[in-house]
Amino acid sequence: MLKISCLKKDLLKATQIIIGAITLKTTLPILSNILIEAKKDNISIFATDLEIGMKYTIKCNVIKEGIITIPARHLSNIVKELPEGELEIIEEKNNIIKIRSGRILFSINSLKKDEFPKFPSSPKEKSINVSTSVIKDVICKTSFAMSHDEVRYVLNGVYLEIAGDGKKKALLKAVATDGKRLAYILNDINVPNDYKKKVIVPSKTIKEILRIIDEWENVKIIIGEKQINFETDNILITSRLIEGHFPDYNQVLPKKYKERVKLNTEQFLTSVRRVALLVSDKTNYIKINIKNGVMILSIEAPEVGQAREEIEIDYKGEELIIAFDPNYITDVLKNIKDDEIYFDFIDSENPGVIRQVNSDNYLCVIMPIKI
């Protein structure tokens, strides 16, 4: 019969992190629970929706070892409202779990631990170590372009391609697209000799990593045939991979451009946001007019009104008028930390391409809107 004593702040942090794996829409009541396993001087807390699983381990005083399940939302909400300091979790008969803090006592009905799904073991493949900064950069600069179309399910995630050079070095390529835009990035990483992988990581897993990545330092990644694990000292995320073939993104990557504009990233982001304030259901785009020395952002929404803003640029090419969904532009810009970007064009009918000025490892292709 499990009995533990731990600090509120530690348990609260653990529950808030792993609760992302809990789904509210389930026909299996046990998936609304987390599993707590107490051994020696720590507890491991598990959550899963059968597609993604999370495990968080914290130090605590284990009075009696054991395994219990407890409703995730109830536990998280209760712990959040308890006073700071130590609290106790005690397993009673008939699946009753007591939570005690000073003169406060909750008794929670739970489910049998045997009903909880078996947590996946780690794939047997070799692991790779990737810095948190690289993982965060890759996800932030691609994940906004993921699709949410249930029909084209292979696009509902980020495609990772790792190709080793046989000398413990590799290029990590990441791609995401929803058919209207495509984000592409590559980074150098260290890998075992001749390491090669091509996988699609689901959008929910990507979002959970992004939500908690600031808790991580270096990340160990293990990629199996149908599963991927992201591991740190006390956090484990395990996820099924999306099965299927990701489209050949190389056909979309631009080989040339005709006109190039250099822009201050923050200024351009702010200007696009301002003009986009008048976007409506009927007018869901802004026009960009590029001509000698100026870029003009504008919108004409008959049911709302008009907006126009000019940005001085160093440009002497042909005049160009092209329209974009402003969200597609701001999604890119708010994830680029460089002071300046390039915006490349061919004409009003071909995609625009946003690149970093100081690095050639990233680009985002955006389809224009015909007007």
Image (spheres, rainbow, N blue to C red):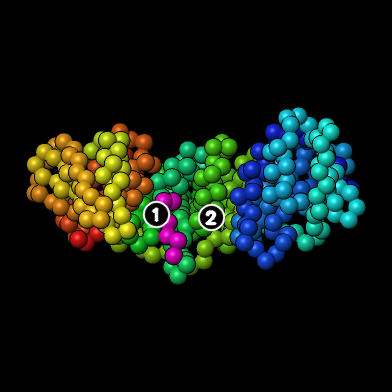
Q: Quadrant of residue 211?
A: top right
Question: Residue lying furthest front in this view?
Answer: 303
Name the residue tied to disc 1.
145
In percent of the image, x 42 and y 56: which residue is there?
146
Q: Amino acid at mark 1?
A: Ala
Residue 111 image position (x, y, % from top left) = 80, 57
In percent of the image, x 31 and y 55: which residue is there?
280
Question: Residue lying furthest bottom in this view?
Answer: 151
SS under mark 2: helix
Residue 228 lies in the magenta stretch: no
Q: Quadrant of residue 235?
A: top right
Question: Residue lying furthest top in this view?
Answer: 85
Quadrant for the C terminus in the image: bottom left
SS under mark 1: helix
Query: Could you tell me if residue 255 is visible in this image?
Result: no
**Sequence order check, earlier mark of 1 and 2:** 1
Query: Could you tell me if residue 44 is visible in this image?
Result: yes
In-front residue for pair 367/84: 84
Q: Residues within 10 Å of mark 2 (few under 14, many from 20)?
A: some
Distance from disc 1 to disc 2, alpha carbons, whole Å, reads: 14 Å
The part of the chain drawn in magenta is: 143-149
Find residue 204 and name its label: 2
In percent of the image, x 60 and y 50: which residue is there?
20
In percent of the image, x 47 and y 42: which residue is there?
136
Q: Quadrant of residue 6?
A: top right
Residue 93 image position (x, y, % from top left) = 91, 52
**246 horizontally vs 361: left or right:** right
Q: Amino acid at mark 2?
A: Lys
In-front residue for pair 324/39: 324
Q: Residues within 10 Å of mark 1 (few under 14, many from 20)?
A: many
Residue 168 image position (x, y, % from top left) = 49, 45
